[in-house]
Each structure stands twice: as structure tokens, then as C-alpha cells.
Image (cartoon, helix red, strand yellow):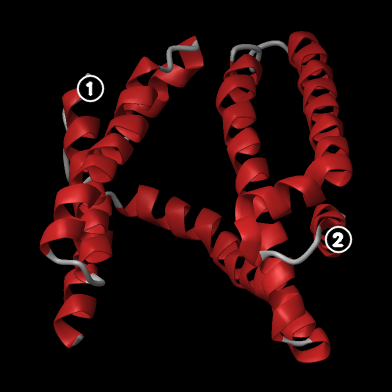
Amino acid sequence: MAWAFQLLALIPIIDGMKHIDYVRFHRKLSFWRSVVVRELPQLFTLLACIPLGMWLGDYRVMLYVLILYGLSYTVLSHLVAKRPYQMAWDSTFIRKIFSFGAPLLLNGFLLFFILQGDRAIVGSVLGPEALGLFSAAYMLTFTSSALVTNVMQTVLLPVLSKAKGSVDAFWVRTVFVMQAASFVGLGFAIFFIVLGGVFSCWFSGSVMPPRRRCWPSSVLCMA
């Protein structure tokens, strides 16, 4: 097993070689490069799961899939880039990066305890069965909300960046972005509060208890 963890250590190195020039084109609302870089690696790994599963049939399948995803993502990010990939050391930028990222590092630790603390409380107070229900409903809502949030950020942030030179235009677009985000968030919350339990049971199949026990978990996760 030690070799597997050693091999997993290559993934951060591979991720560090990614070229993020494709993000620059979001300012022009051009997203086809992002689609290529983000979606094709998932297709490659999905297709690779079948032969790897038939060949290996154990945990090594996931190990190789993760590495294949990182490699394909990195290669595609370089293929769609317009600017060359270069490595350099600039003390000024390094200081700015650390001064900007230090609070985010602390925020990351807090988010970890926030996201995992509720599971610890549910598991210790209500038991493993309730923890399973809560985790299933949480993953359903969290994954969906993360997808919606990512799409909204990708589409709406370039709208704001185009008006950075004008205070009045920036304020108008800020109001529009806030209204759009509130509208989508409200609709998303209502959808899962009303139908979250149904989807929790449906996605879980026959393993999940009756719907009346799934519904409160989904509502709790959305709250």
C-alpha cells in the first residue's frame, strides 16, 4: 500500500504543471477552452475505468484514474493555451501571493472543520445510520450547489470585470449579478427543500429507508 500513497504524491506535482491561460478567455465570455480542458479528461477517465476495472479489479483502478485525469487535464491545458508556459521567480509576486493567500489558508482550515464538524456531531449524537442519511443528502445538495456556483462564477464574474473602469457601470452590473445569484440560489433551495427527499431516496436506490426519513436530512443540509 505504501507505493500507492507514494504514487498519489505525484498528483500535486502534475497539478502544478497545469497551464491556466484558458481562464483568461473567460473575460471575453469564451468558454470552449474550459469545456475542452475540464470535460475531456473526465471522458477519458470514464472510458479508462472499463478496461482498468476488467484488468485490475481493485483499488489500483481509482489510483490510475486519478493520475490519468491529472495528466490529461495538464496536457490539454497546454494545448489550448495561447501564451507560453514559463517558470520564473519574482520576489515581489511571491510576497504578494503569500500575503494574499495566508488568510485563505486559515479560511481553508475553518472550512474543513465547518464541513466536517456537522458530520461528527450527527454521528456522535444520532448514530451511524443517521450519519449515513445525512451524508447522502449532504453530498447530493453540496455537489449540485457546487456545480451551480461554479457555472455562475464563470459566467457572471467576467460581466463585472468588463466594467472595472467605470464606477457607475460596475455598480449597475453588481446589482444585476447579485439579483441573478439570489434568484438562482432561491430557486435551487426551494427545489431541494421540496424535492430533496425524493431525489435522495431515488439516487440511493433500495438501500435508503422510506422517503419520510430522507426528506428531513435534505432539508437540514439545505438549511
What residue would you read off at disc 2? 220
Which quarter of the rendered picture does the N terminus lie within? bottom left
Tell me the kind of residue under disc 1: Val
Position in image of residue 192 (x %, y %)? 81, 43
Q: Is residue 217 above or below residue 141?
A: below
| Label at residue 20 | none
The residue depicted at 59 percent of the width and 38 percent of the height is 147
Please indicate whether residue 28 sits to the left or right of residue 127 in the image.
Answer: left
Which image quarter: residue 153?
A: top right
Is residue 50 in view from this perspective?
yes
Cα–Cα gap, marks 1 and 2: 42 Å
Tell me the kind of residue under disc 2: Leu
Please indicate whether residue 7 sits to the left or right of residue 28 in the image.
Answer: left
The residue depicted at 85 percent of the width and 22 percent of the height is 179
> Which one is in front, 189 or 100?
189
Which image quarter: residue 156?
A: top right
Position in image of residue 24 (x %, y %)? 40, 23
> Which one is in front, 29 or 85?
29
Graded by Cα atoms within 10 Å as few (under 14), some (14 to 19) or many (20 or more), the crowding at tag 1 reads some
In the picture as drawn, the residue positioned furthest to the bottom comes out as: 124
Which quarter of the rendered picture does the C terminus lie within? bottom right
Please indicate whether residue 184 sits to the left or right of residue 50 in the image.
Answer: right
Is residue 117 in view from this perspective?
no
The residue depicted at 80 percent of the width and 10 percent of the height is 168
Q: Is residue 154 above or below residue 43?
A: above
Q: Secondary structure at mark 1?
A: loop
| Label at residue 80 | 1
